[in-house]
Image (tube, helix red, strand yellow):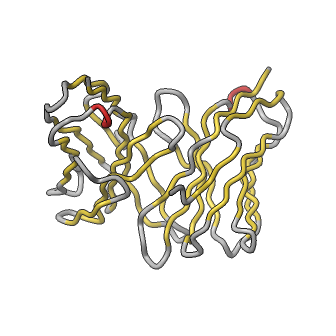
Amino acid sequence: NAGVTQTPKFQVLKTGQSMTLQCAQDMNHEYMSWYRQDPGMGLRLIHYSVGAGITDQGEVPNGYNVSRSTTEDFPLRLLSAAPSQTSVYFCASSYSTGEGFEQYFGPGTRLTVT
Amino acid sequence: QQQVKQSPQSLIVQKGGISIINCAYENTAFDYFPWYQQFPGKGPALLIAIRPDVSEKKEGRFTISFNKSAKQFSLHIMDSQPGDSATYFCAAKRGTGGFKTIFGAGTRLFVKA
């Protein structure tokens, strides 16, 4: 199993440009989510999905769109990039255990917006 | 508004020592408290987790202590090793079937050889 894969690893955008961060998982997990990681702020949830066709907003959804047409894929779209979106983005897939949720994170995409 | 407060921000421990990282929360609806370990350039990985009906959970050298009345929980790393040098995040998940996980700000641990 490849686990959770993310592309690209690095990206530089100019203000106002749009792009899509790709995320795929091969573990057949129901739940997928996108986080951004900024220094001193931990990980903050952007959007999440509890199954194909179902998405919802997290803590910091503004400026981002998601869709989930298949169980495997969960792309994150930046509509009009802003310098405030400079961050490291992590995709995660999760499944429910008897105790809670086990989340598997991808390797991340480092995005710089100039 | 930081719903999960983590301290310290950074920590230096001698090899063989005990590393202690603390977290506090306000929302009593949280029902699952995982800890994640992150190495540079990698995504976080689940280390250990606890539910609030348990006061302590141990897995190898890693122990979570949970104080429900104080709304605090902590990670203890016994016999700390240089390979434990990483950033550690505490987190909390909202209950009643919820999925959203709130993370603390992270603690950078450095274990001196």
Q: Which of B28 and A20 is in front in this view?
A: B28
Q: Which of B75 and A36 is in front in this view?
A: A36
Give residue A55's quadrant in the image. Answer: bottom left
| A49 to A42, vertically: above or below | below
| A13 to A95, vertically: above or below | above
Measured from the top left, where is residue A82 in percent x and y?
24, 35
- Asked if residue B93 lies left or right of residue A91, the reply is right
| B113 to B48, vertically: above or below | above
- Asked if residue B26 lies left or right of residue A92, the reply is right
Measured from the top left, where is residue B102 in percent x and y?
49, 57
Counting labels gives 0
Residue farthest toward the bottom in the current orientation of the protein: B96
Q: Residue at x 44, y 66 (%)?
A: A96
- Asked if residue B46 lies left or right of residue A29, the reply is right
Measured from the top left, where is residue A83 in percent x and y?
29, 31
Q: Which residue is drawn at 22% across and 48% down?
A: A64
Q: Residue at x 78, y 40 (%)?
A: B19
Measured from the top left, where is residue B26 in percent x and y?
61, 67
Q: Locate the C terminus of chain B by quadrant.
A: top right
Give residue A67's quadrant in the image. Answer: bottom left
| A82 to A26, vertically: above or below | above
